[in-house]
Image (spheres, rainbow, N blue to C red):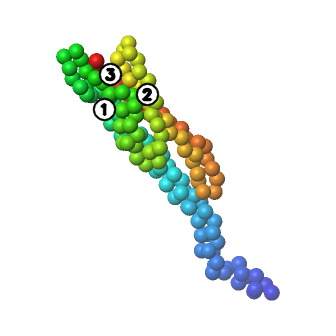
Amino acid sequence: MISMFKKLRQAEEGAGAIEFAIAAPVLIMFIYGTFAFGQILEADAGMQHALGQGARYATLCLNPTSAGCTIPTDTQITTKVTSALFGPASSITPTITTDATAKTKTISLTYSQAMNFLFFTGPTVTFTRTKVVYYAN
């Protein structure tokens, strides 16, 4: 009987399977979390790109005349921004605020995503990107 317990104590046949069973869920969670974090970075890149396109378009003089310029409307700027969005943030709509006194337009995008780590849900990440554009009229 003692020799059987001694053999069991020294046996290592299933050790690799047990270690894998303990480590695999943690590894899968980290890989999935990295993917979720990558989606947030992709959304941020899409927002920055779209804001740059919208800001550039908002500064254009569409119809130059001797009296001044025709600047793009908020609807035209919104169309430009939404067409330039990509990734997970491609369905958001910009907010445009005009300050006629300072001759500026503020273009803002806000994106929210709940962090999902496969086995549990993390906090919701919300971030806003804004560009202020000066226009000549």
Given the image, on which type of amino acid does mark 1 rest? Answer: Tyr
SS state under label 2: strand
Would residue 49 be seen by someone viewing this image from the given angle?
Answer: yes
Q: Which residue is mark 1?
A: 57
The one of 32 and 72 positioned closer to us in this rendering: 72
Given the image, on which type of amino acid does mark 3 rest? Answer: Tyr
Task: Indicate which disc, 2 or 3, sits on the residue closer to the N terminus.
Answer: 2
Q: Position of residue 121 (x, y in %)?
A: 63, 50
> Relative to 126, is 99 on the left or the right?
left
Give the answer, above or below, for where 32 lies relative to 69.
Answer: below
Q: How many other residues sit within 10 Å of disc 3, few (<14), some (14-19) or many (≥20)? A: some
> Circles 2 and 1: CB distance less than 8 Å?
no
Given the image, on which type of amino acid does mark 2 rest? Answer: Ile
> Relative to 4, is 37 on the left or the right?
left
Q: Give me the C-alpha separation between circle 2 and circle 1.
A: 13 Å
Q: Position of residue 128 (x, y in %)?
A: 48, 34
Q: Give me the C-alpha separation between circle 2 and circle 3.
A: 13 Å
Label ID, residue 134: 3
Q: Position of residue 98 (x, y in %)?
A: 41, 21
